[in-house]
Image (spheres, rainbow, N blue to C red):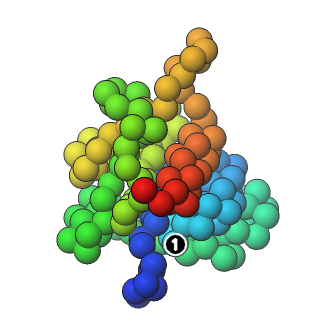
């Protein structure tokens, strides 16, 4: 199955074990609005498309390809071979999202609520980025963080440098 037309620069979203259907629905809605070609998630330890996800996504679940895979690390390795670069989010990252170039063939990777990415998923990322937080709260909800990341990529991709 071809996820991206030959003339398009791949723009993918990988979700590692997101379990809340409200978060997944909001993420699909945001991903559709940002022009993501496909959302990829593991089959196990993650929510799939449910009625709640469909309702919260306000139709996006019917439009954006949502692909559940058996082995997320292997899928990432295959996408790497196809030239896709992976940027994962981590509060341990030294660089912020705004310091990275998000214009090429890209898969943004976000982890589960509370736990973040699993070790193998993080190890398969080419770059890690944090979202700078100015307040007392240490991190954002995964659906909000996804929106920040996706639309920073959209902003950069619209800028010709």
What residue sits 33% from the left and 55% below the top?
Answer: 86
Residue 122, image quadrant: top left
Density class for disc 1 (Cα within 10 Å; few <14, some 14-19, many ≥20) is many
Circle 1 — which element?
Answer: loop
* Residue 28 visible in the picture: no
What residue sits 28% from the left and 49% below the top?
Answer: 125
Residue 33, image quadrant: bottom right
Tell me where residue 64 appears, x and y as whole percent.
61, 73
Considering the image in quadrants, where does the N terminus appear? bottom left
Tell me where residue 82 appears, x and y as whole percent.
25, 74
Considering the image in quadrants, where does the C terminus appear? bottom left
Q: Is residue 125 above or below residue 106?
A: above
Q: Nearer the viewer, residue 80 or 103?
A: 103
Q: Nearer the viewer, residue 18 or 128?
A: 128
User: What residue did someone put label 1 on?
Assistant: 37
Q: Nearer the viewer, residue 161 or 3?
A: 161
Tell me where residue 79 appears, x and y as whole percent.
29, 69
Instruction: Describe residue 75's horizontal placement relative to residue 61 as left or right.
Output: left
* Residue 30 visible in the picture: yes
What residue sits 40% from the left and 86% below the top?
Answer: 6
Residue 95, image quadrant: top left
What residue sits 59% from the left and 12% below the top?
Answer: 136
Instruction: Describe residue 37's horizontal placement relative to residue 1 as left or right.
Output: right
Number of labels in the image equals 1
Outermost top residue: 136
């Amino acid at each position: 199955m071809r996820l991206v037309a030959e003339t398009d620069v791949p723009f993918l979203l990988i979700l590692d074990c997101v379990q809340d259907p409200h978060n997944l629905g909001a993420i699909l809605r945001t991903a559709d609005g940002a022009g993501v070609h496909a959302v990829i998630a593991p089959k196990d330890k993650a929510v799939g498309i449910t009625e709640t996800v469909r309702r919260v996504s306000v139709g996006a679940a019917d439009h954006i390809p949502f692909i559940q895979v058996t082995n997320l690390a292997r899928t990432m390795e295959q996408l790497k071979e196809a030239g896709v670069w992976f940027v994962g989010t981590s509060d341990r990252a030294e660089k912020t999202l705004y310091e990275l170039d998000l214009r090429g063939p890209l898969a943004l990777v976000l982890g589960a609520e509370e736990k973040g990415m699993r070790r193998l998923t993080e190890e398969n990322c080419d770059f890690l980025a944090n979202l700078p937080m100015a307040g007392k709260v240490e991190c954002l909800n995964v659906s909000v963080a996804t929106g920040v990341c996706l639309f920073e990529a959209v902003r950069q991709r619209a800028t010709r440098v």
